[in-house]
Image (tube, rainbow, N blue to C red):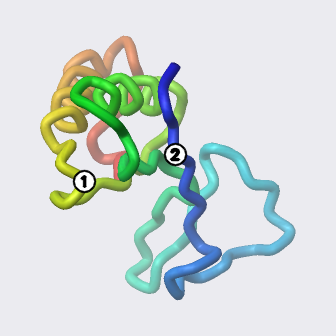
Amino acid sequence: EYLLGLIAMGTTCGLPRGNRNEELNINSTITLRSGLKMPRFGLGTWLSKGKGECYKATQVALKNGYRLIDTAALYDNEEDVGKALGEVLSARRRSGVKYRNLA
């Protein structure tokens, strides 16, 4: 089993809340002040444990439609996230994941 931390953007952090009547799904986005769109839902990697867990969770998340991966140097999981991103992106013909669609 893999711990997938779901983060929902737009409810905190001073981000615009968007249309309150909008039906939320994995493809929901928020338009930032700059005009860029950011996914509302993403994978939180903060509490991933041990080497490999974050790698597999990132792979599963990307293959299931997540396009936002929340990570930071403090989490000490850049290697796992980078490896998973690299593999999924290199197999983009099969996975459908494109670099420009990630946040």
Is 102 left or right of 84, judged from the image as shown? Answer: right
User: Of all residues shown, which one is farthest toward the right?
Assistant: 21
Is 88 left or right of 74, judged from the image as shown? Answer: right
Q: Quick one: SS at disc 2?
A: strand
- Name the foreground residue: 54 vs 59: 54
Q: Which residue is mark 2?
A: 5
Which three-letter amino acid code belongs to the residue tagged 2? Gly
Identify the residue at image location x=13%, y=36%.
Answer: 79
Q: Quick one: SS at disc 1?
A: helix
- Name the foreground residue: 77 vs 88: 77
**Figure quadrant of the C terminus:** bottom left
Q: Is residue 10 visible?
A: yes
Q: Earlier in the sequence, mark 1 or mark 2?
A: 2
Local crowd at mark 1 within 10 Å, few (<14), some, or many (≥20)?
few
Quick check: 14 above or below 11?
below
Label 1 to label 2: alpha-carbon separation: 13 Å
Identify the residue at image location x=44%, y=50%.
Answer: 44
Quick check: 30 above or below 4?
below
Identify the residue at image location x=51%, y=37%.
Answer: 4
Q: Which mark is residue 11?
A: none
Local crowd at mark 2 within 10 Å, few (<14), some, or many (≥20)?
some
The reply to whether callout 1 and callout 2 are in contact (CB within 8 Å) is no
Which three-letter amino acid code belongs to the residue tagged 1? Tyr
Q: Position of residue 8 (x, y in %)?
A: 59, 60
Q: Position of residue 53 (x, y in %)?
A: 34, 27
The number of numbered discs placed on residues in the rendered structure image is 2
Is 27 left or right of 54, judged from the image as shown? Answer: right
| Residue 77: quadrant of the picture | top left
Q: Is residue 69 visible?
A: no
Q: Which residue is mark 1?
A: 75
Q: Position of residue 90 (x, y in %)?
A: 20, 21
